[in-house]
Image (cartoon, helix red, strand yellow):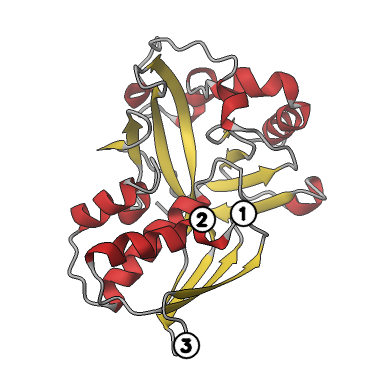
Amino acid sequence: MLTFPNAKINLGLQVINRRDDGYHNIETVFYPIPVQDALEVKTSQTAVDYSLHVRGNSIEGDPKDNLVVKALHLLRKDFPQIPGVDIHLYKHIPSGAGLGGGSSDAALMIKMLNQLYSLNLTTPQMKAYASTLGADCAFFIENHPVLAKGIGNIFEDVEVSLKDHYLVLVKPDDFVSTKEAYAHIHPKMPEYPLNEIIRRPIEEWKSLLVNDFEKSVFPNHPNIVAIKDKLYDLGAVYASMSGSGSSVFGIFKEPIEFVDEKFAGLFCRQRELLI
């Protein structure tokens, strides 16, 4: 079975307060975008547990720590009838970009195993499994825009559509760790609730829809600042860093000609938004 896990962007990100467990409560809108990996799973003729074959963008670390493998082992604890599988993963979504690529892979792994081996899991059950693998992982089970609260794991439906707009997504070589992103954050209640801002016309977002991590990240990463500025220079109606970075996106009313040339040497993709 073959599927194509997609990325997401964050429309706004407000850090509300610090929790007793050391994490932070946030509010953000997760919005799915058509930038995709490819994931194939089939019953293995040789592997008792799994074999994992990764192509495309490299992934650091031990294969057993890959989220698709963790998703397999998570389900197999409750469904030991799941046989050994061969996993082929083509990584196109950049890692460390604030795009949720690993979480998306894991969520789609859960959905495929459910279908392949007739586990009869409901959508809420799949989301419950996914949520144990990462705060945003459950989002990709249903894969429609949501207002995310808590640590990014509590979802509410939100009415927002960028259909007929165009996304330009750019990722520099900069790496931004979560620790760095939170280093200079000062949590506060926002002046305008995110679920109100997101209902306003997109032309008003530039002055209202803020990613709090930009204040922390931008001073040390002028490359990221320059990308955002350039997207506005090209005519974006809204541009922002996604999550804690390092990717930046711009929303346009018309496609940009020769956009790859304008961001030569960087990961750059232009896509029409369909939802």
Q: Amino acid at mark 3?
A: Thr
Residue drawn where x is 77% and y is 32% of the image = 223
> Of 159 and 225, which appears nearest the observer?
225
Q: Residue extending furthest bottom?
A: 45
Residue 73: % across, % down: 36, 63
Q: CA distance from mark 2 to mark 1?
A: 7 Å
In the rendered view of the protein, which quadrant contains the N terminus?
bottom left
10 Å neighbourhood of mark 1: few (<14), some, or many (≥20)?
Answer: few
Residue 51: % across, % down: 51, 75
**Residue identifier under label 1:** 61
In the drawing, what numbered circle is on residue 46?
3
10 Å neighbourhood of mark 2: few (<14), some, or many (≥20)?
Answer: few
Vertical side of 177 occupied by 265: above or below: below
Q: Amino acid at mark 2?
A: Asp
Residue drawn where x is 69% and y is 36% of the image = 231
Does residue 55 appear left or right of residue 38 in this picture?
right
Residue 135 can be seen, yes or no: yes
Badge 1 marks a residue whose secondary structure is loop
Residue 157: % across, % down: 26, 39
In the drawing, what numbered circle is on residue 228?
none
Vertical side of 117 occupied by 156: above or below: above
Residue 229, picture quadrant: top right
Q: Are marks 2 and 1 in contact (CB under 8 Å)?
A: yes
Does residue 118 appear left or right of residue 175 in this picture?
left
| First in residue order: circle 3 vs circle 2 | 3
**Residue identifier under label 2:** 65
Badge 3 marks a residue whose secondary structure is loop
Q: Residue extending furthest front?
A: 48
